Structure formats: structure tokens, C-alpha cells
Amino acid sequence: MAAASGRQVKLGAYVTFQGCTWQVAAVAGASVTLVGENGQTASVLASFLFADPAFTVVGSPATGVQPWGLLESVPERERERALAWQRHIREIETGLPGGPGSVGMPRPEYDPQRQSMAEREQAKADELTRLGWPRVSRATVRRMRARYHAQGLWGLIPRRKPSSATGQADERVVAAVLEALRRQRGRSRGTLKGLRELTGQILADTHGPGTVALPPPSTFNRLARVLADPLEHPGRPARTATAPVRPFTPTVALRTGELVQIDTTRLDVMAIGEDGKPLRPELTIALEVATRSVVAAVLREEGTKAVDAALLLAEMAVPHPVRPGWPDHLRLAHAAVPYDRLLALDERLQSAAARPVVVPETIVIDRGKVFVSTAFLAACETLGVSVQPTPPRSPAAKGSVERTFGSINTLFAQHVAGYTGSHVLQRGEAVQGEARFTVAQLQELLDEWITACWQHRPHDGLRHPVLPKAALAPNEMWGALLGACGYVPLPLTGADYLELLPVRWHPVTGRGIRINHRTYDHTLLNEHRGRPSPTGAGGKWEIHLNPHDVRQIYIRLPDGHLHEIPWIHRDHVHAPMSETTWRHIRTALNRRAGREKHEAALAEAADQVLRRSRPLPGSPAAATPSGTLPAQHPVEDAADSLDAGEAPTHDDDDSQAGGEEPPARFTLYDAFEEAEHW
């Protein structure tokens, strides 16, 4: 019964089974009877016997697949010599060069029935000597047979003593070079000459000056290249991570919403801020890994706040509405998805854009303070989302979203006015003057580009098992996965959005609620003025504030609901105002000598800034002088501004006569300077 090539289980043979040595007593069909060393017997199936990991036939050569891959790395001359030895050894043992089962008649000097093994070995040694093989004796033939039985064909390859990578270099010099490389790890890369000087200092400090000589520069350079990590050769950029490089494992998601990656970066486009100055906004996106869909994207002027990350969650689970002016083919009804079935589940999809709607199961974040904030984690807990932080110094853990940022820059940002390039060497000379769009307008462009381009662009990482050769678009992959995982709508009301806003704690005084020099008041607070909150810590009341629209706050009253409390000057500000705009106005007004810090003046200035922050349709924003907001209202509106009301009146004659220079005015708006452009 053949157990493997070169091994046979026959009567009287000894085998190793389950850690013990047995002798084969009988073989009946597929059953093998074994007798142990202590006289115990066992009858087992042959297949069960051969499947034992410890099974071997005592005295038989070890078997296994020949390392043909290693043989390919051997020089051709040595490989052919090993194959020749294999044929000669087979002829010695079986009489035929092809081994057992080959056809033909053995030569007389190698016939096992007539000649002994010693005679056959001597005959082979004489034959090889006549053929010109150097130094072949009977002992050589016997040694080659033993190596062939022990290692197979690989044992017939000539053995050479492995050479050291460092050659004959002094071990003390090798140790010093390794120490110098260790000291340089994580620092800026120097030159090989500097590394040689550092090695000499280490040798002098360790063994004494002049005890160990440094090798010549050329020898030292070869030694340093051998010992240094390929990524840390002197002269190359320093590695930012000190941890060893981990093996790369691609992220796999099989259901929509199973894995969503969130990250923030600066967009490579200059935009016009609320103060009229150019800036680079921050972009926060949520990428659904299974379909590579950008399910949410938010642009902010400066540091992304926790409320942006929290509202990003709600934006994923709510259908994106089709904006006014978008073509009909950007509607979900025209996408490659089962629209009729989805509409029967969620009526909100009737006017939705062609972008996926997902409820995330797990969100992968880095350790940025925005994503580990209390507001974001509380929002995830409210929606039942699991948060998975990435390991430190592991950018590949969010490789999909990192790569998407690069795609947004190459496919979208470089075509937008004010493109800055990915680094300073690609930046133009007048990038700031090319800015044309405000952050809100840029947000509109980005949303339309995601719907029209990104979601319909084939992605090489999206493959369906039925069509593995065709790259699918994110919307196509979403439609394919809907049949496997389905769609469960998550209805969110306005109250749910308020709950996602960041929380603050403030007392309710007789004048209302005071936050950052703004007063919020309403008749709802009458019965709670001066009274402690029954649920808040220290008697303070729970306040929800949107930092991107500070015109109102929301307070939780004893009935458990959030109620809106307006700013007392909200009627003066006709557009959403952020904390950034408020701080800018306060700073500008505080610089004016003798100016009273009055809240009404701040409200009026805020309204003027927001009104003038957006250019007129058809007029480029870059035409406005640097530091001055574009005028969007006629002369009558300019007379109502803070500065025009306080500035002295000048008639046309005085202006043309070149009278006295008017006093310093509010830097955000200058009526006389604006008049020159009318």
C-alpha cells in the first residue's frame, strides 16, 4: 500500500502514528492492523493512518515537493549536473536511469539481480571517471546517494559556505556603523561622509582613540549601504514613522454602510471668506468603502468643528436634495438603481439627487480632536454607529479616503479658479487674485461635481463577481449591493438635528442668556429667570448652539424639549452668521479708538459684512481691491453703514478740490474709496 512517493506500508514495516511507533501486522483492503511496542493492537483505515500529521514510515526517506523555484535560481551548469547525478543514482539503485516503472533493460554492470550495491557503486565511479568527471570515487557516489535520499534533488546541488554580507569587515566597525544608523533613525538624513565621522566618534568613545581604524571611504560606503535599511539610506528623506513598515491589507466591505471612513484636509483651492479675504477652506468627507461613494462632504472656512462631523452623520442618512438649476439626469430616478422599489420605502427619494443614502454601521476615524470630541461620539451613540479609531502612525488604515482626497484634487480642484496645486512648487504667482467663489458657492460646485462626475465615474476598485472584468461606478455598485443588503430608511426630524448640535451650559439671568457678548432672550424664559436647572450640573441650563449660525440658540426646558431662543438683534442680520465672522467684527471694532463696544453696532456691522461678502452675478470677485469686500448694494445702502453714519459729509466740490484728508474709517468698508468704482 503506497503512502506516498518512495514510501510503502507493507507487512513488517514500522510506522509512526499518533506519536508512537507501530509495526504493520496485516493489510486487508482499506484496513491496516498495527501492533504497538507494548503489544497493544489497533485497526485503522489507511486514509486515517496517512492523514495523521505525524505519520512516517520508519527508515524511509523524507518526501515532499521538490523546490523547483529554488532550482531556477541555481546556475544552469549546476542544475544540469544535479539532474545528471539523479539519473546515475537511479541507475545504481534500480538498474534503469528513469527509475522504477521506466522501460528498458538494465545494463549488466548495474543489474540488481547480478551485481551487489558495492559493485554497482564502483562501476558508476569508474564510468564517471572515464567520462571526465573530476574526483569521482566510490565514496563520492555513496555520499551523493545519501544526500539524494535525505534532501532529494536539492541535495545534489553543490554546497558552498554562505558569504557574510559584511565580508571581512571588522566586527567592531560593523557594530559602530549599526549604532550610528540607530542614532540617525527618525532624524533628518545626512550624507555618508557625516555618517562616517559619527562612526569614527563611536569607535573612539568605545575602544579608545586610534584603537580601531576606519575603513577607506569607498569600503565604508559599501558597508553602510549593506547595513542600512533600504528606506533609510543616508541622503534620502527622513521617515516620519519610527515603527516598522506593516504589511498592507486592503480594506474590504461587503454591505453598504458597513464601513465609512471620515477625514479632513485642506482643499487646494483659494476661496473668498466672509471677510472678503482669500483663504483655503477645510474639506471633510465621508467615504462609503463598499461603493467608494462620497456620501457627505462639508467645506468650512477654518478649523472643522465637532458640529460639522456630527451633522456629517445626519447628511449620510438623509437623501441629498436636487438643487435648483441641476439637470434632470442628476436625479435619483435616472440612476442605475431600483428607483421604484426605493421610492416605495422612502418617499423622500422622489426629489433626491443620484447619490447613495446609507446608515453607517462603523465609522473609521483618526485621532483628531474633532472626531474624538464628546459631541461627535455622542452623535454616533445617538444614531447607533460604532466608532473605530485607527492605530497611531497608520495612514494606510484609511487608505481609501486618503486616496479619494487626491482624486478630488486632480479631478475637481485643478479645474476651479484659484487652484493652488498640491505643493508650493506647483503654485502660481497670483493664486489669491484668481479666487472667484465663496465657500458656500464652492460647496455648491463640489456637491454638483460629486453627483454628476464622481458617482458616475468607473472606479477600478469596484468589481462585481458576475462581471469581474468591468469596473463599476459608485452608483452602479450601490445598485448591485442593494439587492444583497437592502435599504432601511432612517427618518430624521428637525429635532434630531438640534440634538446633534454641540452642548454648552449657561445660567438664565434676568436679562436672558449671555454667550460671547451676545444676549439671547424670549418670553419663554420668564418663569426660569434666576432659577437653577433641575437637571443641569451646578444649576446651569443645557444650551445647544450651532457655531455656523449664532443668531439663535436652543435651550432644554423642564418639558424635555429644545426651544429656540433668538438673539435680541437677530432682525438686523439677514443671513446666517458664524462665530468666525463675529470674532472678526469684534476685533475690527475694538481697534477703533474711542469706539463704544455696543452690541447693536456689532449686529449692524455683521449684516453689512454678510451682505457684501458675495459678488454680484456676472461680476468677478477678484475685481475688488484686496482687503475690501465687493459692494452689492447701491449708494443708498452704503449711507446706512456704521462708517458712513459717522464720517463727515463731503460734497463733490470738496472732493475735487482736494480738501483735507478724511479721518481713518472702518477697514472693512470705505464709502469714498468705493465711490471711485461707481
Image: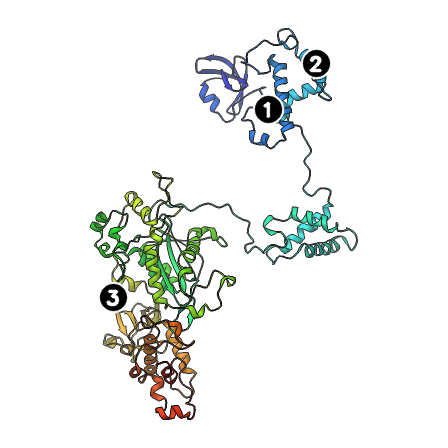
The picture places residue 615, in percent across and down from the top left corner, at 34, 72
- The numbered mark, 2 or 3, whose residue comes first in the sequence reads 2
How busy is the neighbourhood of tag 3: few (under 14 within 10 Å), some, or many (20 plus)? Answer: few
Name the residue rendered at 42%, 68% in the picture: 434
Q: Which residue is mark 3?
A: 561
Q: Which residue is mark 2?
A: 122
Q: Nearer the viewer, residue 654 or 668?
A: 654
- The numbered mark, 1 or 2, whose residue comes first in the sequence reads 2
The picture places residue 35, in percent across and down from the top left corner, at 51, 16
**Which amino acid, mark 1?**
Gly
The picture places residue 231, in percent across and down from the top left corner, at 58, 50
CA distance separating discs 1 and 2: 22 Å
Secondary structure, mark 3, is loop
| Left or right: 24 in relation to 662 | right
Tally of numbered tags = 3
- The numbered mark, 1 or 3, whose residue comes first in the sequence reads 1
Name the residue rendered at 52%, 47% in the picture: 246
Secondary structure, mark 2, is helix
Q: Which residue is mark 1?
A: 152
